[in-house]
Amino acid sequence: MTEHPSVHPVLGIDLGTTSCAMSVWDGARLIVIPGPTGAPTVPAVVAQNPAGQIVVGRPPGAGQAVLTGIKRALGEAEPVQLRGRQYQPSEACAFLLIDMKRQAETFLGAPVHDAVITVSGSAGEPQRRAIREAAGLAQLNVRRLLDDPVAAAVALGADDREHTCAVYDLGGGTFDTAIVRIGPDGVSVLGAAGDPRLGGDDFDDHIVWYVLRQIRERHHVDLSRDAHVWRRIRREAEQRKRELSTATHTTLELPLLTATLSASVPFSRRAFEAMIEPDVTKTLGYLTAALAAAEADHGIGRQGVDQVLLAGGSSRIPAIRARLAGYFGLPTTAIRADLDPDELNARGAAQIAREYEPAPTFESFRPGLLSANLRLRAEMADTPTPELPDTPSGRPDVLHPVPAETPADYRRVAEAAHTLLAAIEPSLPAASGWHIPGEGGGLDPSLDALRAAYAAFIAAIHEAAPDSRLAELGKDLSTEYDQTGF
Ligand code: ADP
Ligand code: MG
């Protein structure tokens, strides 16, 4: 536990559809509170581990029951389902907030009772109410619900000049845009528009359809109705999509997609850009609508915008930056890429949070709220304490590559197992060689048996074990691999 005595313990929370982030003022500057893997964002995913406990913030493992897109369900009457259990959307959201509160308390070494939480600019009253409800269930005082674009603009910070910015926030499941004026006196929204169902998830879907088409042409099978195949491709698509923000070419590697079919599909940035072009054009349509509102109410047109602020992970796609520069007739330097789009909204929320005094305790005395909180917490697995080994090499949980001397009979299954473990568990770092044990460390418990069988087999090869022993372990590995269903 780290002591941060001068910290202002009112959290700035970016509650996203796909991922969440947190920031606080540490007495000298805004800091982003890292998630359990050290990354600034935590996936907005609630899942159930094999023991039936709720775990938060891990990318879903194979075959795991998960809840995603929770923010989008807020304000709707329908409960959400997690392996036969029903939760109100605000309860599902409370799991995220309880986990974030815990993370923050561990990081700050002090209790936290207050937060400023961001909300989509287009959120209606029912959604806002549901977020307040969720915060209450997490025992957090909501000091303010802050519109996402305002948070982004606040994070930019004011200088002595007045600026008119367009905020372009393209996340995983939502698109928000606003024209904002930033001045020494604060931030005001001149016009806003958005789409609660447009974002990087749609881009992933386009890639999946493309891959399924390629497979159909090459192998004459239609796998589009296989939910399991769909999930595998989507996971790979999301990774390769991110890669194309820096590389121009990549390949989707899909070993043993079915019992008989492996696919390796080359994919280029150009093909990706063509795929998402209609979606990007749609976002510019919303931008035009936001500008029309700013023009009608405040006389600010397209020419009046001097900067574009990019927020949301999908704004990292280079083509989007270029389209925005063209749209506004601005140099690319005016499309601000120097601010981390993952952290922007959380930083803005934390900046506003400084205006509120931390409370000594959770303030609501609504009957039933504390017991509801305890009930939810009882369902959750404990937050893991990361333990990093001093000497990573030789640990059984390090993912070693398949050695050259692997017997031919088992080479294929060993390679498939290695690819699967590396792909499904991207946080199993081949390079750094360690992982954080327990929940939240990025390891998928449903793959424990496969991981162990693989480690035993590879260790036996390294030890030059007798052939009979290798055959035995190789057979175990094949059995475990078959059981994963990949
Ligand atoms: P939300 O606000 O909806 O929670 P985020 O701002 O966290 O979403 O953005 C998540 C989305 O950004 C995902 O669709 C993810 O695939 C996408 N994304 C993240 N990094 C990149 C990248 N480098 N290139 C392209 N897309 C990215
Ligand atoms: Mg976001």
Image (cartoon, rainbow, N blue to C red):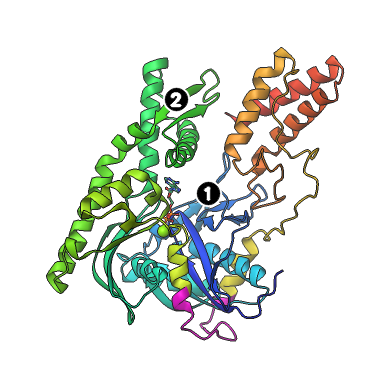
* 53 up-or-down from 99: above or below: above
Q: Residue 66 carries which label?
A: 1
Task: Name the chief secondary structure element in magenta.
Answer: loop
The magenta region covers: 351-370
Question: Label 1 sits on what residue type?
Answer: Val
Q: How crowded is mark 1: few (under 14 residues within 10 Å), some or many (20 or more)?
A: many
* 136 up-or-down from 323: above or below: below
Q: Position of residue 2 (x, y in %)?
A: 70, 70
**Secondary structure beneath disc 2?**
strand
Q: Mark 2 points at which residue?
A: 265
Which of the two discs, 2 and 1, sits closer to the camera? 2
Q: Position of residue 392 (x, y in %)?
A: 77, 43
Residue 64 in sight here: yes
> Residue 241 vs residue 334: left or right?
right
Where, quadrant-wise, is the N terminus in this rendering?
bottom right
**Secondary structure beneath disc 1?**
strand
Q: Where on the picture, by quarter, is residue 120?
A: bottom left
Q: Where on the picture, by quarter, is residue 407?
A: top right
Q: Residues within 10 Å of mark 2 (few under 14, many from 20)?
A: some
* 21 up-or-down from 108: above or below: above
Residue 220 in sight here: no
